[in-house]
Image: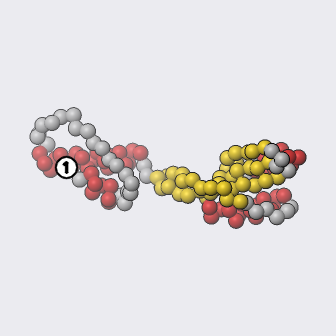
């Protein structure tokens, strides 16, 4: 019954555990099956569902003299998240965003900085978003 609930919700890579504290037979086989299925259904309603999406990590470099102005600019948008900044001969900013937003982010940066910007992918991760 628990697996049926998970399949009906089309959940994958999911485990459900229900613990019984009473070992009697008062519920009967049908009542026990309904109790297990009901517990899983209630847990799903309470917690909610999420979907894993792939997000890319992209590097954007600039000269140390531009870093303050550009970092301030990077916080003024909602296309990506400034995840990290590495300082050296160049300042490398790591931007985290949904992969389909890369082109829009490059265009936004090109427009704001008045020069061509190409983001270099440095990796990817998965994040959960509510559905």
Q: Is residue 113 left or right of residue 36?
A: right
Q: How many marks?
A: 1
Label 1 crowd bin: few (<14), some (14–19), many (20+), radius 10 Å: some
Q: Is residue 18 visible?
A: yes
Query: Would you identify the image quadrant in which residue 106 lies?
Result: bottom right
Q: Residue furthest front?
A: 89
Q: Does 78 appear above or below 110?
A: above
Residue in the image at 37% along x and 52% along y:
14
Residue in the image at 42% along x and 49% along y:
48
The image position of residue 13, as x and y in percent, is: 39, 54
Say what secondary structure mark 1 lies in.
Answer: helix
Q: Is residue 72 visible?
A: no
The image position of residue 98, as x and y in percent, is: 61, 58
Query: Would you identify the image quadrant in which residue 35 lies?
Result: top left
Residue in the image at 53% along x and 57% along y:
53
Label 1 belongs to which residue?
33
Query: Would you identify the image quadrant in which residue 68 lies?
Result: top right
Q: Nearer the viewer, residue 66 or 37?
A: 66
The image position of residue 16, as x and y in percent, is: 32, 47
Q: Is residue 100 left or right of residue 66?
A: left
Q: Does 119 appear above or below 92?
A: below
Render colour scheme: secondary structure
Q: Nearer the viewer, residue 87 or 70?
A: 87
Residue in the image at 55% along x and 58% along y:
54
The image position of residue 71, as x and y in percent, is: 78, 47
Q: Residue furthest top?
A: 21
Q: Is residue 101 left or right of residue 29?
A: right
């Amino acid at each position: 019954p628990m697996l049926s609930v998970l399949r009906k919700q089309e959940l994958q890579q999911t485990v459900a555990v229900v613990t019984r504290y009473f070992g009697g037979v008062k519920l009967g086989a049908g009542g026990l099956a309904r109790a297990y299925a009901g517990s899983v259904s209630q847990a799903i309603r309470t917690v909610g569902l999420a979907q894993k999406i792939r997000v890319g990590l992209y590097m954007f470099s600039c000269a140390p003299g531009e870093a303050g102005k550009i970092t301030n600019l990077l916080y003024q948008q909602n296309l990506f998240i400034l995840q990290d900044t590495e300082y050296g001969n160049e300042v490398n900013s790591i931007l985290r965003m949904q992969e389909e937003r890369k082109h829009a982010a490059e265009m936004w940066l090109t427009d704001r900085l008045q020069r061509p910007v190409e983001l270099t992918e440095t990796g990817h991760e998965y994040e959960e978003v509510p559905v």
